[in-house]
Amino acid sequence: MTDRPLTILLVVAHLAHRSGLSLYVQNLATELHRRGHRPIVYSSRNGAVAAQLRNSTIPVLDQLDAMGVAPDVIHGNNYSETLLALLHFPSSPAVFTCHGWASAKNRPPSHPRIRRFVPVDQTCRDRLLYEHAVPPELIEVQYNFVDMARFAPRPPLPTRPSRAFVFGTKLKPEHLQLITEECERRGVTLHVLGSESIDNPEIILRDYDLVFARGRCALESMAVGAALIVCGREGMGPMATTQNFDELRSLNFGMRALRAPVTREDVVRVVETYDAADAMAVSRRLRAQASLDGAVTEMLATYTAVIDEHRATVYDRREEDLAIARFVAEVEAQAQRDRERTREVRNRLAEVKAQAHRDRERTREVRNRLAEVKAQAHRDREQWRSKLEQLQARHGRLKSKLKKTQHELAAVKPGVVRRLQSYLKKSVNPGPSES
């Protein structure tokens, strides 16, 4: 290992927020800086993590032109940004770390000056070896790490857990519901929070006995001393124990460890394996094997080997030209796909706009028809109001006439009654007949 300070260009797609990859770069750069080396970080999208690095006096670039000297080594972590750095600094060798199985951003670039490919687990190693034809002699597996000084051990775990935490993993709603119900049945309070929302996980994790997590969040949970259940959107893994620790660590507590579906039976089975003493033993084991200090020492050895190999290698210019040509072709192909996608989006947007125009026309027609209906209803009301007024007037006249008639009848009634009574009297008591 070299004794002189190295200038190391760490390349990553973004430093916008807390994520497994951005924290990997931040921790690595910070420890390299502490040891007297010169880490410089290049990221096309900067944010909170970039600000923290700059506050530590570590340079952060969003343009490679801003770097006035070539680095001793480039440490790439994403496909496109790594190739851009290699093209910009044609005299520098590179190391590439593969952080994931599925993402296209984590696929390894093909370039002769990439002297080492560093997968963070066996899953990523298989991706490099079997999907991208990386020669096995160029692959060095280096497992993920934790800043143990930051994530200090908590007090001993209780015999039975009382607080649980879903940390940094987005579970399906139905799976989260199952876990919540089974925790509540056991008197365990469950909290849920994404890792990007937490600035101080090393403090928050100390309050929880049982954590559901994967990847870096799983490592941080165990480093503090919580019992870990490997869990993610893809499924559920086991409780981390001293028996399965080595296997789970080789898988980075990630995708391949999430083998079981999240069913009620699986949740019950895994939660019931909680063992405080074993969880604390797992924590001690992780702290001994996964420290930031040890990881940086290992990475520095890789840097030194790569630099030495690079100096002793005469490169075939055609290989570099071919790598550039492949990259340009991929960029053009991606640009073509983006143009096609943009065309599809524009066509869809045009359809949406046309439909919106038709909807507006239809709305206008409906409004006009509604206005006509309202106008007709108004006319009908006016017409019926007029008829009602006529009927009311006629009713008033008839009522007046009836009243007058009643008065007239009342006036003639006494005379009529007298005449009728006189007539009846005469009819009942006729006078002497005329002889």
Image: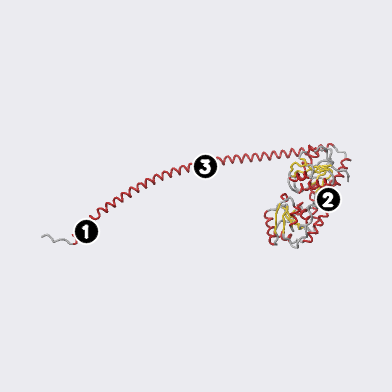
Task: Give the Cα distance between marks 3 and 2.
Answer: 73 Å
Q: Amino acid at mark 3?
A: Arg
Residue 148 numbered mark, or none: none
Q: Earlier in the sequence, mark 2 or mark 1?
A: 2
Q: Amino acid at mark 2?
A: Asp
Q: Nearer the viewer, mark 2 or mark 1?
A: 2
Can you give x and y, in whole percent of width and height, for residue 100 in the image? 77, 48
Query: Which residue is denoted by mark 1 in the rendering?
Result: 421
Task: Give the Cα distance between marks 2 and 1.
Answer: 137 Å
Q: Nearer the viewer, mark 3 or mark 1?
A: 1
Which secondary structure, mark 1? helix
Q: Earlier in the sequence, mark 3 or mark 2?
A: 2
Can you give x and y, in whole percent of width and height, for residue 224 in the image? 78, 55
Q: Earlier in the sequence, mark 3 or mark 1?
A: 3
Query: Which residue is denoted by mark 2 in the rendering?
Result: 293
Q: Amino acid at mark 1?
A: Gln
Query: Which residue is denoted by mark 3 in the rendering?
Result: 367
Q: Is residue 393 visible?
A: yes
Where residue 346 sits, quadrant-wise, is: top right
